[in-house]
Image: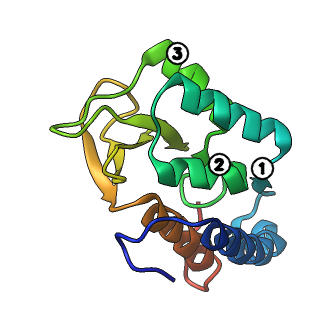
Amino acid sequence: MSVSGERLDSELVRGWCKQTSSALGVLMSSFLETHGFPPGENAITLATDESHESTDELVDLTPIPSDLATLYWVICEVSLPDVDNGYFIHSASTVAEHFQEYGSVRIDDECPALVFASDGGGHLFAVTGSGRVWRSTTASWFDDFEVTAASIREFLEQIGRRVVGQDRPGSPAR
């Protein structure tokens, strides 16, 4: 789907939304039968005029990596509670609220990082000015972070592969 190091563009994000939504539809159609309980609300919510305003407000509040701005130009938020342990890309307004409450996170020698996502276990995902995506080692804003993806593009690809992989026979039930 991509080559790491390339900048994220809106077309790629739209393609990711379409592919992942399609795979999510397949996964949700057999979820109850496969897992023995009904799925939660799994959705990729596309950006709106209101979410674009929130993105502009976030940019005014703090510098954000251009790939994150591109992501928010296409996606408002992502909620995938039934994919692995869950994945949540927070809305720009939520990111702004968290930034105002907690500030940015410090990661090694990187510029301060902006938390933009989390998983169902409370681990946080932050993006730095270099574009790398980091995952907290615990469910805390103040502990260590480890690189999880070279870019937001790679992060999206990882989530997309997990959606597709979870639908395959033999995938572990949650």
* Residue 29 or residue 154, whichever sits in front: 154
How many numbered callouts?
A: 3
Q: Is residue 172 visible?
A: no
Q: Label 3 belongs to which residue? A: 100
Q: Earlier in the sequence, mark 2 or mark 1?
A: 1
Secondary structure of the residue carrying numbered label 2: helix
Q: Label 1 belongs to which residue? A: 47
Q: 151 left or right of 147? A: right
Q: Is residue 130 visible?
A: yes
Residue depicted at 36% across the width and 73% down the height: 4
Whole-percent x and y of residue 139?
A: 40, 32
* Residue 145 or residue 113, whichever sits in front: 113
Q: Could you tell me how far apart the alpha carbons at marks 3 and 2 are, in whole angstroms?
A: 18 Å
Dot 1 amino acid type: Ala
* Quadrant assignment, res 30: bottom right
Residue depicted at 57% across the width and 47% down the height: 69
Q: 165 left or right of 143? A: right
Q: Could you tell me how far apart the alpha carbons at marks 3 and 1 are, in whole angstroms?
A: 22 Å
Dot 3 amino acid type: Gln
* Relative height, residue 135 to residue 140 (above, below): below
Q: Could you tell me how far apart the alpha carbons at marks 2 and 1 are, in whole angstroms?
A: 7 Å
**Mark 2 in CB contact with mark 1 (< 8 angstroms):** yes
Whole-percent x and y of residue 9?
A: 57, 66
Residue depicted at 78% across the width and 52% down the height: 45
Secondary structure of the residue carrying numbered label 3: helix
* Relative height, residue 24 to residue 135 (above, below): below
